[in-house]
Amino acid sequence: MPYRLIPGYAMKWKVRWSYEDAVEDNFIAPLRYLAHLTPELLSNAPKQLSATPVGREWPDMIANSSQWVVRPAVKDSIEKLEPHVHTFIPVELLSKKHAAPELFYFLRIGQAIDAVVIEKSEFVEGFGISGFKKSPYLAPAGKTTLRAEQISGKHLWRGGWVSPKGDVVDRFWCDIFCSDALRDAFVHAKFRDCRFIECDVE
């Protein structure tokens, strides 16, 4: 069964970021929203960012406003199952409290897939089409149904749809999904701080 991949929200794994608005505007936000990576965007990637872990250790997966920043071990687990699909952009995390043990990576998920069955999914304002029309955001822990044929053979993807012009546009841009194989790899490795919500398929 596929899963929605979401932050665990455990306070001891929370990380506080500190960076200029220009970093958000010129790199982090476009990294989430642009359909395709561009040389200009990659040239804006920061080499270092200030971040402070709340607890005594760094998590393996850091959620930053619907954008994951991950350790090399997480990168390796993803690439083992799905090589040459996703982009990992290195960044050194700087903290006066605890030095980061290694480089982390911004994870740019390389595929947006239109797989959500709206009629059989729960949204923050209700179920199905009526709920979607009120608010097109999936309920945080609600039922989500995906089309099996759309996700067959895929291991990590973000929500998306294809416009009539053929452009890939994120519809459920803040929702990330993964296969049971990737979920099992993450659980086996005990990566922190993420959790999984099982989805239905049809």
Image: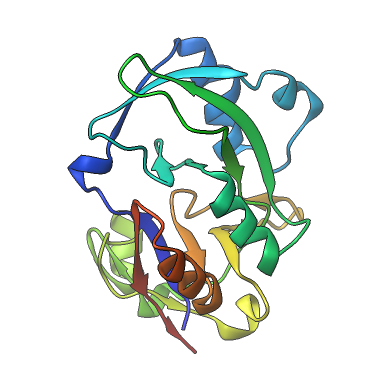
Instruction: Please report the residue visible at 43 percent of the width from the left and 47 percent of the height from the top.
Output: 60
Where is residue 118, by image quadrant? bottom left
Q: For this rendering, which residue is in front, 3 or 115?
A: 3
Q: Residue furthest left?
A: 11
* Most foreground residue, 114 or 5: 5
The spot of residue 146 in percent (x, y) is 49, 78
In the image, is 143 to the left or to the right of 89? left
Residue drawn 49% across and 64% down?
Answer: 177
Residue 26 point in image, percent of width and height: 59, 18
Q: Position of residue 96 (x, y in %)?
A: 34, 14
Tell me the residue at 39%/36% (across/down).
65
Q: Quadrant of residue 131?
A: bottom left
Count of numbered circles on the image: 0
Q: Is residue 49 above or below residue 192?
A: above
Q: Give the camera-side residue of 104 and 34.
A: 104
Residue 98, compared with residue 106, is above or below; it is above
Look at the image and tell me whether residue 196 can be seen.
yes
| 140 left or right of 160 in image | left
Q: Is residue 136 at least partly visible in the picture?
A: no
* Relative height, residue 124 to residue 94 (above, below): below
Q: How far across and down, in percent of the image, does residue 121 sit?
A: 35, 74
Residue at the extreme bottom: 202
Q: How is the image coloured?
A: rainbow
- Residue shown at 49%/20% (left/top)? 24
Q: Is residue 92 above or below residue 11?
A: above
Judge by depth and name the residue closer to the eye, 55 or 172: 55
